[in-house]
């Protein structure tokens, strides 16, 4: 099952280099693949702690997104929506959340968590991303332990 979240903002970053600078400024370990971000649609490869991972990334239509979610108060009519989608992999989860938090920070946007329907301000998105970074090693150990008991 794919999971998704969205960054809503009134401005966009113009390049992967600009986005990477925002990620680096936040101190996150994800390194995005250098691609033409303005036209990117689909899987965006990334490195997380030196290992290949990534997530899907789409420039979604803000008008359509807000119209499809008309029951949600997003605060105002945002101009841009950057969609993030990933499978249940912990590394993809961490890469997507850290990249989204950094993007929201750089664009003064908000993060809409499609899984629980919450809207997170930059500070909350940053905190959520840092919690995922902190918890991922423990979750991976627990998953590995469960798998070893199943065999």
Image: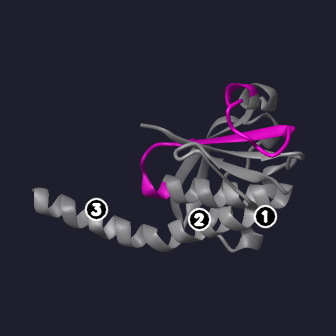
Q: Disc 2 on helix, strand or loop?
A: helix
- Asked if residue 145 lies in the magenta stretch, the reply is no
Instruction: Of the two numbered discs 1 and 3 on the same chain, state the one appearing first in sequence.
Output: 1
The image's mark for residue 125 is none
Answer yes or no: is residue 121 visible: yes
User: Magenta region: which residues?
Assistant: 67-91
Alpha-carbon span between mark 1 and mark 2: 17 Å
Whether the residues at callouts 3 and 2 have beta carbons within 8 Å, the answer is: no
Locate the N terminus and report the quarter of the image it occupies. Answer: top left
The answer to if 77 sits in the magenta stretch is: yes
Look at 56% across and 49% down and name the residue there: 54
* Mark identifier at residue 22: 1
Task: Return the residue at label 3.
Answer: 143
Q: Quadrant of residue 102?
A: bottom right
Question: Where is residue 12 shown, x and y percent of the image?
Answer: 86, 46
SS at mark 1? helix
In the depicted structure, whether residue 25 falls above or below residue 93:
below
x and y percentages locating residue 108 in the rendered image:
85, 57
Considering only order in the chain, which callout, 2 or 3, is on the residue closer to the N terminus? 2
* 79 left or right of 24 in image: right
Residue 18: image location, x then y, percent = 84, 57
Please tell me how crowded label 2 is: few (under 14), some (14-19), or many (20+) other residues with Cα within 10 Å. Answer: some
* Contact between labelled residues 3 and 1, with CB atoms less than 8 Å apart: no
Is residue 62 found left or right of 117 in the rendered image? right
The front one of 133 and 32 is 133
Across and down, in percent, residue 109 comes to 80, 53
Residue at the spot of label 2: 128
Report, in whole angstroms, how far the alpha carbon at label 1 lies from the one at label 3.
31 Å
Of residue 69 and residue 53, the one placed in the foreground of this image is 69
Is 91 left, or right, of 123 in this rendering?
left
């Amino acid at each position: 099952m794919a999971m998704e979240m969205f960054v809503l903002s009134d401005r966009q970053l113009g390049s992967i280099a600009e986005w990477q600078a925002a990620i680096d400024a936040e101190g996150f370990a994800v390194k995005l693949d250098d691609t033409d971000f303005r036209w990117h649609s689909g899987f965006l490869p990334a490195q997380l702690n030196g290992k290949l991972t990534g997530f899907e990334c789409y420039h979604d239509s803000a008008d359509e997104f807000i119209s499809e979610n008309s029951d949600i108060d997003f605060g105002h009519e945002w101009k841009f929506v950057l969609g993030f989608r990933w499978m249940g992999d912990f590394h993809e989860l961490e890469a997507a959340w850290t990249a989204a938090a950094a993007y929201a920070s750089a664009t003064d946007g908000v993060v809409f968590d499609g899984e629980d329907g919450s809207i997170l301000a930059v500070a909350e998105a940053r905190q959520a991303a840092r919690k995922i970074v902190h918890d991922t090693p423990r979750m991976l150990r627990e998953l590995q332990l469960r798998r070893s008991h199943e065999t």
